[in-house]
Amino acid sequence: MKNEAKTPDAYIESLPEDRKAAISKLRKTVKEALPKGFEEVMQYGMISYVVPHTIFPDGYHTNPKDPLPFISIASQKSHIALYHMALYSDESLLKWFQEEYAKSVSSKLDMGKSCLRFKKPDAIPYDLIKSLATKITVSTWVERYQSSIQKQESTKKKK
């Protein structure tokens, strides 16, 4: 469900009433918890937190004109999504999150590689999301991202 809003505030204003409060609270939770250096932008039709080009000029490998994504928040057709790129690239962080989720939330975790899906806005574990957002600094994320890209390139060369 791509949104053409140009700012996070416009994005939230464009949402159905039943999603505005949850997305606003999720946005506030992430913004308050993220380590310094990440920047809030609209990217790929979502509210996103990225490593700006001023810190990582190379940008995102799929399109270097785009800043390196880290966390994104979206209102999808049947759920609210939080995309956390480090969950996909960091097994220990993923394990920590899965264990903490099981301890603090009664519903089953609905998750893709980096996507957390919440079908019920009132079931979003904001405190857990806040803890998750604090776990990775900008410099750590850039290092892990670069390491991941180098591994991909090395694997391609071997084939």
Image (spheres, rainbow, N blue to C red):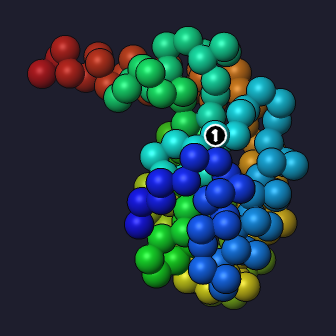
Q: Position of residue 76 (x, y in %)?
A: 48, 71
157 vs 73: above or below? above
Q: Position of residue 140 (x, y in %)?
A: 68, 26
43 vs 22: above or below? above
Residue sitting at x 47%, y 54%: 4
Which quadrant is the N terminus positioned in? bottom left
User: With 12 as the anchor, is 68 left or right in this view?
Assistant: left
Question: The residue under label 1 is which amino acid type?
Answer: Val
Q: How many marks?
A: 1
Q: Quadrant of residue 69?
A: top right
Q: Answer yes or no: is residue 92 visible.
A: no
> Is residue 8 or residue 23 the one in the foreground?
8
Q: Quadrant of residue 42?
A: top right
Q: Position of residue 47 (x, y in %)?
A: 61, 51
Residue bearing the label numbered 1: 41
Which quadrant is the C terminus positioned in? top left
52 vs 39: above or below? above
Q: For the view shown, which residue lies furthest in the right direction?
A: 32
Residue sitting at x 67%, y 64%: 12
Residue sitting at x 70%, y 74%: 20
Q: Quadrant of residue 82?
A: bottom right
> Is residue 51 or residue 111 the one in the foreground?
51
User: With 41 as the anchor, is 30 left or right in this view?
Assistant: right
